[in-house]
């Protein structure tokens, strides 16, 4: 992967590079360059060659950069950050941190990846993870005794991500219980929490995020639900407000998300879900809308409601209530 990643660093600008120049930089022959470029398709990367010009990517890629991400941190969030790793390729950022957690990693240890070969979604679903097209990150955090346990944590993480996107000018993002970020009913991102611990605490939590930034057509075809990426969202805003709308780069987005996420994980550790409730209610796309609950062979219709302490309530027309705990 190291040589392939070096090739991508050379091609990331979206310009043509001759096979001879690429080979000289990589220390390989032109035929080896050709094979290396062809291998990029397995990572969801669209690269091509033009005789007499060389190789180029279909569109530029802004590679993740540690210093540019850290530029979005302040003194408080730097104090909450354990370490930051940016990996070219990995099976899953959540799995990577889970495997390393026993090594005594500090709270706030963060893993970003450019590409996931086995990205994880909720309930074992695959998260389509082409190279350089999204934000894939996971954060390790330990919690002591929590008054409500970890209930509501996935919602708090969603609030943090939505707040980060708002801060870079992305509007119209909503949250769908328990872990989806939506825009106009289409999935923009997803949150995956993996918890280990006793009912009364302490807890080890790995909070993972996949956020679509600019998905290539070939990878988008593999997604089995309505989806959207930030490129589309920002393009829509540009049509509404004029061409002056500037698309935020991946490093700005990654850094701002990390900033808000570290702050809000710390806030949740001290105060539980209470400080997030009003913001969650404002972002909840299902609140007061008709829903269908499927349980084995039975379906029940009702309306989505929020109730206290940290539960999702479905209220039926006969005024009885059914509560589904938030985890």
Image: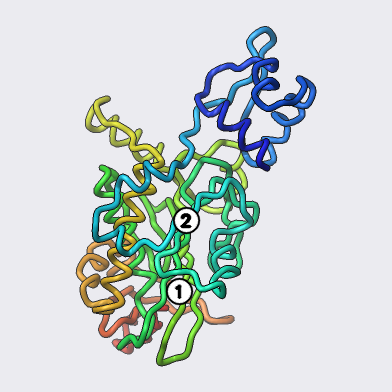
The N terminus sits in image quarter? top right
Which residue is denoted by mark 2 in the rendering? 137
Q: Residue at x 51, y 49 (%)?
A: 86
Q: Is residue 291 left or right of residue 266?
A: right
The C terminus sits in image quarter? bottom left
**Is residue 242 placed above or below 201 in the rendered structure?**
above
**Is residue 21 placed above or below 79 in the rendered structure?**
above
**Is residue 306 placed above or below 212 in the rendered structure?**
below
Q: Residue at x 25, y 84 (%)?
A: 308
Number of marks drawn: 2
Q: Is residue 142 left or right of residue 51?
A: left
73 or 115, which is in the foreground? Answer: 73
Res. 305 image quadrant? bottom left
Which residue is denoted by mark 1 in the rendering? 205
Q: Locate residue 60, reporting x and y percent.
A: 50, 28
Marks 1 and 2, the one that precedes in the sequence = 2
Label pair 1/2, CB-CB below 8 angstroms: no
145 or 101, which is in the foreground? Answer: 101
> Can you name the residue that lies furthest to the top here?
52
**Is residue 292 placed above or below 110 in the rendered structure?**
below
Q: Residues within 10 Å of mark 1 (few under 14, many from 20)?
A: many
Determine the CA span between mark 1 and mark 2.
14 Å
Q: Locate residue 184, reporting x and y percent.
A: 36, 49
199 or 125, which is in the foreground? Answer: 199
Q: Is residue 313 left or right of residue 24?
A: left
Please give the label number shown on residue 282: none
Q: Locate residue 67, reporting x and y percent.
A: 38, 43
Q: Residues within 10 Å of mark 2 (few under 14, many from 20)?
A: many
Q: Residue at x 69, y 40 (%)?
A: 42
Judged from the image, the secondary structure of the residue bearing numbered disc 1 is: strand
Q: Locate residue 231, reporting x and y percent.
A: 40, 37
Judged from the image, the secondary structure of the residue bearing numbered disc 2 is: strand
């Amino acid at each position: 992967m190291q040589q392939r990643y070096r090739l991508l660093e050379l091609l990331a600008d979206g310009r043509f590079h001759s096979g001879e120049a690429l080979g000289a930089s990589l220390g390989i022959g032109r035929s080896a360059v050709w094979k290396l470029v062809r291998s990029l398709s397995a990572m969801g990367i669209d690269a091509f060659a033009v005789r007499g010009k060389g190789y180029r990517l279909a569109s530029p890629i802004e590679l993740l950069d540690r210093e540019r991400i850290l530029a979005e941190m302040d003194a408080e969030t730097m104090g909450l950050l354990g370490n930051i790793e940016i990996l070219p390729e990995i099976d899953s950022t959540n799995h990577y941190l889970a495997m390393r957690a026993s090594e005594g990693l500090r709270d706030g240890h963060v893993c970003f990846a450019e590409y996931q070969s086995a990205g994880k979604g909720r309930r074992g679903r695959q998260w389509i993870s082409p190279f350089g097209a999204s934000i894939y990150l996971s954060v390790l955090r330990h919690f002591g005794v929590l008054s409500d346990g970890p209930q509501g944590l996935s919602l708090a993480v969603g609030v943090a991500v939505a707040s980060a996107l708002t801060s870079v000018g992305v509007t119209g993002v909503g949250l769908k219980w328990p872990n989806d970020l939506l825009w106009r009913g289409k999935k923009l991102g997803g949150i995956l929490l993996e918890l280990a611990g006793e009912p009364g605490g302490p807890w080890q939590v790995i909070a993972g995020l996949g956020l679509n930034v600019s998905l290539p057509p070939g990878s988008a075809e593999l997604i089995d639900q309505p989806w959207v990426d930030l490129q589309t969202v920002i393009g829509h805003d540009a049509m509404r407000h004029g061409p002056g709308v500037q698309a935020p780069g991946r490093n700005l987005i990654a850094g701002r998300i990390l900033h808000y996420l570290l702050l809000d994980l710390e806030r949740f550790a001290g105060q539980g879900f209470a400080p997030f409730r009003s913001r969650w209610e404002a972002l909840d796309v299902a609140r007061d809308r008709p829903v269908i609950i499927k349980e084995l062979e039975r379906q029940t219709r009702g309306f989505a409601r929020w109730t206290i302490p940290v539960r999702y309530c479905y209220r039926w027309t006969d005024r009885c209530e059914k509560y589904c705990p938030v985890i």
